[in-house]
Image (cartoon, rainbow, N blue to C red):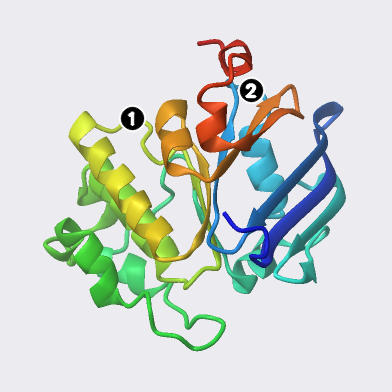
Amino acid sequence: MSEDKAIILQAQNVHAWYGSSHVLQGVNLEIRKGQTVGLLGRNGMGKSTLIRTLLGHVAKRDGRINFLGHDISNSKPHLVARLGAAYVPEGRGIFSNLSVRENLIMAARLGQEAQDEWTLERVLSIFPRLGERLNNMGNQLSGGEQQMLSIGRALMTHPELIILDEATEGLAPLIVDEVWSVIETIKKSGLSVLIVDRDWHKVLKRSDKALVLQKGLVVLEGDSKAMLLNPQLHNFLGV
């Protein structure tokens, strides 16, 4: 990834607390335009907290976060979303009482330059299964279909950055392969992507760079392909 690519998101010395628990302890993160970044670490090391902090969901936080030239260090989640950050949460978070079409259309908005790239038609071309279930309610979909809907809904917001938090969690192997194929398609589209997933090997094979968190600190960072060969990785991930 060329270093002359514009910086989409930059987090500097970010701290976060849940009550008296100091979860993030000075994290730095940079994502450039068109870059795919993997976020690795064992359970409870701060990955989801970092994502929630970047998006404005953690109330007690410190440090500087810049997104598309805007200081969002103290911004509310809806303002971060309006700037172009799309979130595919662990657990999918779709609206079960809305149809597939309604879930997708409700999220639709023009891109920053009024580009009509992520249309309903394009999303359905990536997820043809959703096209077959447009009138089905969210609670009538399988787990895999719900995940596809969650990703499709995020794309309909025309994001500058899409964050995928455990997008393959709890899915059947064939569906997992399909989700990773979609992630590859998203990457090729030029979107900036931040990925958290338990399958660290697939994350590293599909990302440009990666960070490893341990107890709220970045303990390893660098080129993803090189990290695959780093013997320290196994110690930090417990594999």
Give how far across and how far down residue 123 sits, in percent.
Answer: 28, 68
Front in this rendered view, residue 28 or 118: 28
Front in this rendered view, residue 136 or 151: 151
Q: Which residue is mark 1?
A: 170
Is label 1 in contact with label 2 (beta carbons under 8 Å)?
no
Ranked by sequence position, the earlier of labels 1 and 2 is 2
Quadrant housing residue 230? top right
- Please say if 29 is above or below 115: above
In the displayed structure image, the side of residue 98 where residue 53 appears, left or right:
right
Give how far across and how far down residue 158 sits, in percent.
Answer: 47, 73
Front in this rendered view, residue 148 or 217: 217
Give how far across and how far down residue 170 sits, in percent.
Answer: 33, 30
What residue is rendered at 67% in x and 60% in y? Answer: 77
Give how far across and how far down residue 48 sits, in percent.
Answer: 61, 37
Q: Which residue is mark 2?
A: 44
What residue is rendered at 33% in x and 47% in y? Answer: 147
Q: Is residue 99 visible?
A: no
**Mark 2: secondary structure:** loop
In the displayed structure image, the side of residue 38 where residue 68 appears, left or right:
right
Dot 2 crowding, Cα within 10 Å, few <14, some 14–19, many 20+: few
